[in-house]
Amino acid sequence: MKLTNFIISFLFVFLIALSITLFFTKDKIDNDGDLKDDESVYLEVEEKYDLLKDSYDQNRFFLLFDDYILNTNNFISTFSYFKDNDLDYLIRTITPYDNPLYSDELNKYDDGFTFMNSNLEEGINDFYNKYKSILEKNNLSKELEKIFLKGISIRIIEIDALNKDMYAFLSKHKKIKYSLSKNGIYKTINLK
């Protein structure tokens, strides 16, 4: 009798645990019944989202510069679009390309260097000086020479803007990729 009660209790607990697991993973299971990876989930969320819809909503965008070359030398000319058109925006962080020679020194800046300055020139100069001081502290004189000549290569910009304004900006700079999550799938906009 005790064994029967134990088996029934065990099955009851097992079924409850299974139900809870299925409830919390139902959105992460694809049509074949397999668990989706995080990239698939991000992709689905972003595919459902259209920059043209809810155009007056504000979002945080992550802009990726792998096809569009962005550095400290052309940063102001690229982002002056927002100021020139009197648009509301806030650049939150700048993440430079990670050079393996001194990536350990930049680990504390994995989420980017804080920007949050309405003046583009002051903000980019502050970023430049912080980055330069890291190179100086680590005696990387050749890297200092490179950034003096070519500027600091920028990989990701985190920016808050209205959807319609970001759509217009990305329409002008078609090689810039965007995502609504830093770890999401980056893509260019589809011009219709």
Image: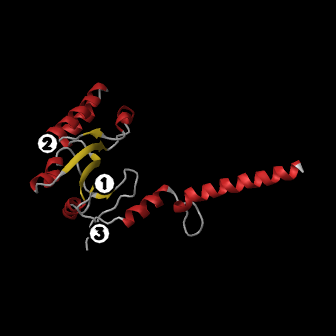
In this rendering, the answer to whether 127 lies above or below 67 is above
Q: Amino acid at mark 3?
A: Asn
Q: Earlier in the sequence, mark 3 or mark 1?
A: 1
Q: What residue sits right under mark 3 in the picture?
A: 190
Q: Earlier in the sequence, mark 3 or mark 2?
A: 2
Q: What residue sits right under mark 1 in the picture?
A: 66
Q: What residue sits right under mark 2 in the picture?
A: 119
In the visual, does 47 lie left or right of 177? right
**For the residues marked 1 and 2, what is the alpha-carbon distance in whole angstroms?**
25 Å
Q: Position of residue 108 (x, y in %)?
A: 37, 34
Q: Amino acid at mark 2?
A: Asn
| Helix, strand or loop at mark 1 | loop
Q: Which mark is residue 185?
A: none
Q: Residue furthest bottom?
A: 192
| Helix, strand or loop at mark 3 | loop
Is residue 163 or residue 175 the one in the foreground? Answer: 163
